[in-house]
Amino acid sequence: MTHSDLSDLSGVTAPVATARGLPNAHYVDPQVFAEEREALLFGNWAGVGFAKDIPNEGDAAPIDFLGVPLLAIRDGAGDVRVYQNTCRHRGMILVEEPGNIRGTIRCPYHSWCYGLDGTLRSTPHVGGPGRNLHEDIKRDDLGLVEFPSYVYRDVIFVNVSRKAPPFEEYAAKLLERWREHDRPIYPGGGRSDFVLEVKTNWKLAVENFCESYHLPWIHPGLNTYSRLEDHYHIEEPGAFSGQGTYVYRQLEGDGGEKFPDFEGLSDFWDAGAEYVSFFPNVLFGAQRDHAYAMILMPTGIDQTRELTGIYYAFDPAEQPEKAAMIDRNADLWKGVFEEDIFVVEGMQRGRYGPGFDGGKFSPVMDNPTHLFHAWAADQIQKYRDAR
Amino acid sequence: MAAFDRQDGAAVARLYGAAGDASSDIDEACFLWTHAFVFALEAGLAEAEIYRAKLVAEGRER
Ligand code: FES
Ligand SMILES: [Fe+2]
């Protein structure tokens, strides 16, 4: 069986009016899932975790990224580094639990030690008992394997294949679009960090986030002040898609107080807000007074962990009087995301029906969704062609 | 051995270090200093350098 027998992508990249969505195999076939793991998730810059979760020097978090053991660490210079969580000796997993590494990472097997910068610092007894050197053990060549990584809007992005262009090039269009939002962001903490386990293929969560078509039906509460007509498509072929609104309304506290704005935003953002699916697996929200990011961590073909963080223009630790409002905002967003669960799970189950042909897009409402499908199909096709 | 139970790396490092210093056999001493060194390194203790220096002096570490 050649790779192209796995699914026929020819209908997906057609213009939206005539295109069909990705075939069922892309949601239910383990072989295609394995292929997409390489082509979409490892071949690009994927979100794997939040920098806020490793705030201090030496903080380390093991991450299972679809079977690839990663280790995110805050190094001595304050930078986030992502290593393979695998010892260079016998391949033992180095760090099992999140925590702080005070000095070096000591492998639990034979105690080879690595610095936060990945260098191999000691190789006890490697030349025999009490002899820690050997001419064939070249420590300089045996540091931790590091993956290219980049932190944007607190999301730790990793390119496992190492073949994607540098992040700043890969994300250039989004960096440019949201240049004004390049301000410090502070995690809300507490309820602002939440995880939703969803029984769906990760792509369906991307697709659902791209579109505003479902808002009046799935989020009627949201829609009372944000009608369909107030939304516009965001379409950046090959990079991201989503939706924007012209009528963003800030949350108000009991006394009418609001969250402070990010500094230096242009007038557009007074009532504008944008929601972008940044391919492959990160969903971003940008608003005048808070931001959020959701990482779609696939844990199986039909299982996705949605990791969410909400961020502000101020440090919540310095304004404890805002804590209640921060929690209220977190609960509002969580409620919205929970409203989406039954649809992404339902679309997953729908795709086990062999008669489904990928679906028919609305040429008017589904353009951002189709843009994602076309991106995925193109990436997968290139991956197949290269094999 | 309470230090081991507590997983107190600093105390463990010192126990090994002292045992190494007390040993009259250089191979045994280096073995013990190696453990002192590793646990001190893991705990981020400055005295890792002391154990390392002892090992370097014997050509066992760099
Ligand atoms: S496997 Fe890590 S030290 Fe042996
Ligand atoms: Fe939604």
Image (tube, coloured by chain):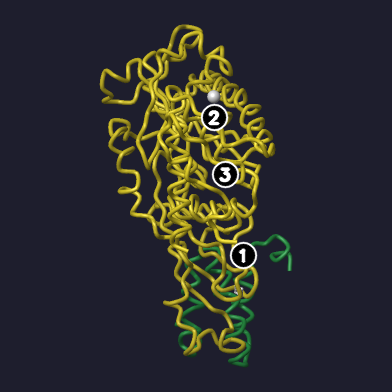
Shown colour of chain B: green
Where's ligand 1: which quadrant?
Answer: bottom right
Residue A297, numbered label: 3
Badge 1 density bin: few <14, some 14–19, many ≥20, Cα 10 Å: some
Shown colour of chain A: yellow
Task: Say what secondary structure mark 1 lies in.
Answer: loop
Of label 3 and label 2, which has the lower sequence position? 2
Residue A230: x percent and y percent?
40, 13
Of A301 and A221, the residue lying toward us: A301
The reply to whether discs 3 and 2 touch (Cβ–Cβ < 8 Å) is no
Residue B37, numbered label: none
Residue at the image point whose x is 30% and y is 43% from the top: A172
Residue A312: x percent and y percent?
42, 28
Q: Amino acid at mark 3?
A: Met
Residue A323: x percent and y percent?
52, 22
Instruction: Name the quadrant containing residue A13.
Output: top left
The residue identified by callout 1 is A93
**Is residue A371 found left or right of A70 in the rendered image?**
left
Residue A192, numbered label: 2
Q: Amino acid at mark 2?
A: Ser
Closer to the eye: label 3 or 2: 3
Mark 2 belongs to which subunit? A
Please say if B37 is above or below B30.
above
